[in-house]
Amino acid sequence: MMNAPRSSASSIARLFGSSIVDQAMLSAANFGVGLILIRYAPEAQYGFYILAFNTMILLTTLQGTFIGTPMVIRLPTLDEGERRQWMGSLLRDQKRWGLLGGILALLAAGGGWAAGLLDHQSATVVVAATMLVLAALYREYLRGILLMYHRPHHVLAADAVYVVVLLAGCALAVRTAMPAVGALLAGMLAALACARLLRRTLATDIDSQAAPGRLREIARMGFWAASGGVIYWLFNQGYNFLTAATLDLTAVAALAATRLTLMPINLLLAGMQKQLTPLASHWMHQMGARRTLRRLMLFSLALGVTTVVYGAVIWLLRDWIFLDLMRKDFAQRDTLLLLWCGLFILMVMREPVMMVAVLRQRFQALSGATLACAVISLATSYVAMLHVGPMGAAIGILVGEACYCAAVIVLVLREARKDDPAAAPRNERQGTE
């Protein structure tokens, strides 16, 4: 009786260990790409790259929430054959819609260039970004399946290939006339190489002959999940586009470079979430919202403490990082760094506990709260940028995140109170099996 919890704890530790190693590797790779571009490319080129990269983040977020969230909720109710059919059907749907969206994006880039709305460089960036997005969507879908199946070690092996190709390609990209385009194409090639390995690993886990149409079945649930994710992106990443329109690409580069120092925390959170979400779904089914929330609060606390410690280290090393490593000294550098640290502390402590509301499918409430906070955030960013420059964008993001944290706390506490303590879990040990 004593061995079961210990074995379960050991399995969970190995599961999170693989994910954390994977995200640490990806974090180092993304930091490496940013560092290469910051050191060896003009700031405007880095600004172009950031805008294209954030577009990719938006669309992979849309895919992950629209498809991933309903699947995590539905997965415990499906047998092996149904899972294979679902995965294959969704993959065929995504390929069809991805191809259509890619063609439309390329036509828009060509039309914008012909009409004089885009110069040659901007149009080329749009084309390269479109190719990156299509490859990234394919890779992320396959990664998501393996992570839902609790096989992060296979993901780790494929991501190692991704990292090697990405860094090698970016090292070559800065030797070209348009480093941003070269870096985006390197990302595309890396994503395709990784996806090929992932697809080979999954083999029969995906029914390649499954009929399309499952995307339509999850559309309602997926829409609310995705709308919340996309709206949240607006005030978490959309400030880059607002900054480019309000100020210039140099300001985008300053914001991105200072935020880049916190990238390991961001990717640590992403890696933990991919494993924590299906685990929390299991807890919710076994124990209810009240005890699930208690467990998730421990993750929030651990992530918060980790972020504070990491932020303190970055603060002490800031001169070496910016002056020696990046070879750039951005305006308002120290203030931006402090603002980003505050933002990340709030964000990493909010994400785990928010799963209670996600798993209870409170997507409309989350979307409404996110929209309101996004409006507050972007409005604050715009007004502040007009008065204090680039750091105004970070101030707006921090204000929006604080408002969102308050809304999430209210929502998850309300969900926890709905549980009848007498009918909650069977027992603590059963919830960890």
Image: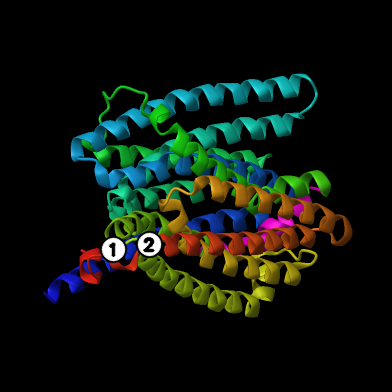
Residue at the image point whose x is 19% and y is 72% from the top:
5
Query: Whole-Å distance between the Cαs marked 2 and 1?
Result: 8 Å
Residue 344: image quadrant is bottom right
Quarter of the rendering occupied by the C terminus: bottom left
Count of numbered circles on the image? 2
Residue 206 in view, yes or no: yes
Looking at the image, which residue sits at the far left? Answer: 1
Residue 419's tag is 2
At which x and y percent is residue 66?
47, 39
Residue 181's tag is none
**Position of 1 compared to 304: left or right?**
left
Q: Secondary structure at mark 1?
A: helix
Quarter of the rendering occupied by the N terminus: bottom left
Asked if the stretch drawn in magenta spans residue 169, the answer is no
At which x and y percent is residue 83?
25, 37
Viewer-side residue, 2 vs 151: 2
Residue at the image point whose x is 63% and y is 77% from the top:
317
Type of the residue with mark 1: Ala
Residue on which the image places disc 1: 423
Q: Residues within 10 Å of mark 1 (few under 14, many from 20)?
A: few
Report if the CB atoms under discs 2 and 1 are less than 8 Å apart: yes
Q: Secondary structure at mark 2?
A: loop
Viewer-side residue, 365 vs 40: 365
Type of the residue with mark 2: Asp
Q: Which residues are magenta?
A: 248-264
